[in-house]
Each structure stands twice: as C-alpha cells, then as structure tokens.
Image: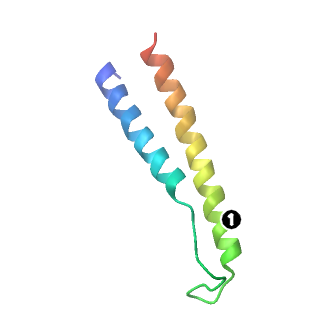
C-alpha cells in the first residue's frame, strides 16, 4: 500500500471508531419490540461494538507504524 492509501484507510478507521463509540444502545424502558429482554440485546450489542473497536484500533496502530517507518 502506498502512503495515500494508508492515510485514507486511517481516516476511515478513525471515523468508524468514533461512530461505534458514539453508539450507546439505549432502549429506554425494558421493553423490546419483540417482547424480548432488552438487557441481553444491549450487552450483546455493546460487547460486539467494543470488539469491533478493538480490531479497528489494532489496525490503526499497524497503519501508524507503517506510516512512521
């Protein structure tokens, strides 16, 4: 990858990370549209987002290292 491609990927990752971190799942009361338990949906979604953010941050670190070489 050339420098421009790395910069673009870095920019995209930063945007995606901030979007994911901004998504605090709030279902309001403990009522879900399908009558299920919102607590489990909430924690699953949050855990998934945190996992994705970690992967993105790891890739971001790799890009930073490549750019700084």
- Quarter holding residue 44: bottom right
Q: Is residue 52 visible?
A: yes
Q: Which residue is mark 1?
A: 43
Of all residues, the one furthest to the front in this rendering is 28
The colour scheme used to paint the residues is: rainbow
Q: Mark 1: few, some, or many residues within 10 Å (few <14, many ≥20)?
A: few
Of all residues, the one furthest to the left in this rendering is 4
Q: Residue at x 66, y 85 (%)?
A: 36
Vertical placement of residue 45 versus 34, above or below = above
- Quarter holding residue 68: top left
Of all residues, the one furthest to the top in this rendering is 69
Vertical placement of residue 39 versus 15, above or below = below
Q: Is residue 20 left or right of residue 29?
A: left
Percent coordinates x, y for residue 69 in the rendering: 46, 9
Vertical placement of residue 25 versus 63, above or below = below
Point out the image quarter for the N terminus.
top left
Percent coordinates x, y for residue 30 in the rendering: 67, 82
Q: Secondary structure at mark 1?
A: helix
In this rendering, the count of numbered labels is 1
Q: Is residue 11 left or right of residue 63?
A: left
Q: Is residue 47 left or right of residue 53?
A: right
Q: Residue at x 61, y 57 (%)?
A: 48
Q: Residue at x 60, y 42 (%)?
A: 54
Percent coordinates x, y for residue 7 in the rendering: 35, 27
Q: Is residue 2 visible?
A: no
């Amino acid at each position: 990858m050339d420098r421009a491609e790395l910069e673009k990927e870095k920019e995209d990752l930063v945007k995606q990370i901030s979007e994911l971190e901004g998504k605090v799942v709030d279902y309001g009361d403990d009522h879900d549209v399908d009558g299920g338990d919102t607590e489990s949906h909430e924690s699953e979604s949050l855990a998934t987002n945190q996992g994705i953010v970690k992967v993105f941050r790891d890739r971001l670190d790799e890009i930073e290292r490549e750019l700084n070489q």
